[in-house]
Image (spheres, helix red, strand yellow):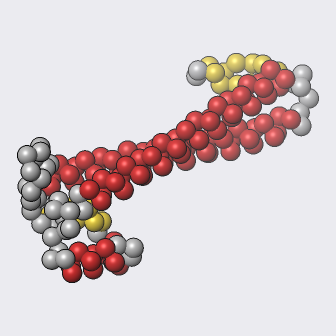
């Protein structure tokens, strides 16, 4: 991803005042890594939402089957094959599946929170600002950067990401 395209802009050059340490990544690398991390977080959120919908579907079916005679025929899709069972055989399996999906959603939510913390740390490390952020919560940080010469107090690249 080039820094000159419309989705991201480099606000200042990377200064290499870190002493004898490794050279800082280029602005393009910083933006690409940041975008990749954001996409990972979005995909986790999307998967969590999809699994939440499955939990709701399982709940609906479980509530419906609880009111039905346990010896009644019931059809269930298992691995792409429709199998005939009774309600008393299917109901515990559905409840177990719902519980496993719930645990998976909890795990995904904790992973999303960890990814959010990682993104925040990365943004702070490389002075990344999102487009439109200055109107909202980033206004004070942007004002302090302008008062300090606008180059970023940490000596890193100031990168603007859309």
Q: In this picture, is 157 found above or below 73?
A: below
Q: Which residue is rendered at x = 64% and y = 31% of the image?
A: 100
Res 133 visible: yes
The mark total stands at 0
Q: Which residue is rendered at x = 62% and y = 36% of the image?
A: 103
Q: Which residue is rendered at x = 58% and y = 41% of the image?
A: 105
Q: Is residue 143 left or right of residue 71?
A: left
**Outermost residue toward the front in this view:** 19
Q: Position of residue 130 (x, y in %)?
A: 30, 65
> In the depicted view, which residue is nearer to us: 21 or 62?
21
Res 7 visible: no
Query: For residue 133, what is the image quadrant?
Result: bottom left
Q: Is residue 107 left or right of residue 102?
A: left
Q: Position of residue 157 (x, y in %)?
A: 16, 60
Q: Which residue is rendered at x = 61% and y = 45% of the image?
A: 52
Q: Is residue 157 left or right of residue 130?
A: left
Q: In this picture, is 119 found above or below 10?
A: above
Q: In this picture, is 50 found above or below 9?
A: above
> In the depicted view, which residue is nearer to us: 86 or 7?
7
Quadrant the C terminus occupies = bottom left
Q: Position of residue 148 (x, y in %)?
A: 19, 77
């Amino acid at each position: 991803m080039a820094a000159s395209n419309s989705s991201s802009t480099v606000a200042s050059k990377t200064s290499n005042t870190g002493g004898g340490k490794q050279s800082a990544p280029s602005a393009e690398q910083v933006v690409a890594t940041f975008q990749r991390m954001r996409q990972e977080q979005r995909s986790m959120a999307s998967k969590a939402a999809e699994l939440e919908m499955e939990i709701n579907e399982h709940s609906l079916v479980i509530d419906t089957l609880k009111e039905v005679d346990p010896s009644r025929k019931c059809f269930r899709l298992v691995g792409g094959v429709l199998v005939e069972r009774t309600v008393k055989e299917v109901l515990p399996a559905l409840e177990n599946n719902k519980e496993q999906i719930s645990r998976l959603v909890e795990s995904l939510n904790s992973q999303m929170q960890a990814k959010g913390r990682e993104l925040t740390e990365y943004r702070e490390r490389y002075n990344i600002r999102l487009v439109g952020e200055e109107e909202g919560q980033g206004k004070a940080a942007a004002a302090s950067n302008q008062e300090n010469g606008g180059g970023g107090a940490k000596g890193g690249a100031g990168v603007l990401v859309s």
